[in-house]
Amino acid sequence: MDRRELLKMITVLTGGAVIGGELLLSGCKNEPTVGGAVFTAQDTAFLDEVADTILPTTSSPGAKAAKVGQFMTVMVNDCYTEGDQKVFHEGIAKLDEACKKETGKSFMEATPEERTKFLTALDKEAKEYQKSKKKEDPSHYFTMMKQLTLFGYFTSKEGATQALRYVAVPGKYEGCIDYKKGDKAWAT
């Protein structure tokens, strides 16, 4: 699977264009923002928890094990425009505030079930926003978080080798391989 194919899959899963996609395809040639908002260790831990709620540990490791929070901080700082960076940073606080309104607890204090229910509702809100927004309007912060979670996880060692089928050095070309319901998708 190449980068373009992965970006197309993420676009379909999140219901909108991949934020920062043009920079991801060109290799993140943006200069890292100097003097912009800085991610704290608490921000990274928060993003790990959000990502792990989206992709929890099952028979394969979750997003937290793949250090997706740290991945998000690098991608936002190095690949997002200043406007998107601002939306993402403000989104951390907005997500926590919305969780407090919904559950009476901060996101970090909420139970896994409360987090899942809350993020499911937030995902619906983000999809509706993405459908109705004007081209010049910023993307929804949760859409950014979800896209980075999927991209970071499925390109990590844990995601590619344990959640997907992976062959480090492919053997012969097989143009048609039978797929059985429940088989993992291919990472290579």
Image: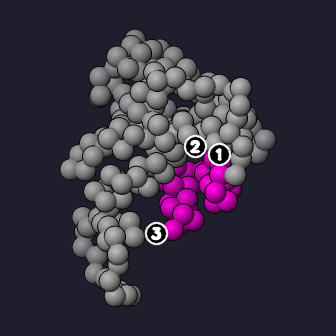
The three-letter code of the residue at mark 1 reads Cys
Q: CA distance from mark 3 to mark 1?
A: 21 Å
In the rendered view, would you say 102 is above or below 159? Answer: above
- Magenta span of residues: 1-28
Identify the secondary structure beneath mark 2: helix
Badge 2 or badge 3: first in the primary sequence = 3
Number of residue marks: 3
Q: Is residue 124 visible?
A: no
Q: Which residue is mark 2?
A: 75
Q: Is residue 97 visible?
A: yes
Q: Residues within 10 Å of mark 1 (few under 14, many from 20)?
A: many
Q: Is residue 135 left or right of residue 108?
A: right
Classify the position of the C terminus by image quarter. Answer: bottom left
Q: Is there a contact, CB below 8 Å, between mark 2 and mark 1? A: yes
Q: Is there a contact, CB below 8 Å, between mark 2 and mark 3? A: no
Q: Residue at x 38, y 30 (%)?
A: 49
**Where residue 67 appears, x then y in whole percent?**
39, 40
Q: Which residue is mark 1?
A: 79
The three-letter code of the residue at mark 2 reads Met
**Where residue 121 appears, x then y in whole percent?**
45, 32
Q: CA distance from mark 2 to mark 3?
A: 20 Å
Mark 3 or 1, closer to the camera: 1
The three-letter code of the residue at mark 3 reads Met
Q: Is residue 108 magenta?
A: no
Between residues 6 and 118, which one lies in front from this camera angle? Answer: 6
Mark 2 or 3, closer to the camera: 2
Q: Is residue 152 left or right of residue 34?
A: left
Q: Is residue 110 left or right of residue 91?
A: left
Between residues 117 and 148, which one lies in front from this camera angle? Answer: 148
Q: Mark on residue 1?
A: 3
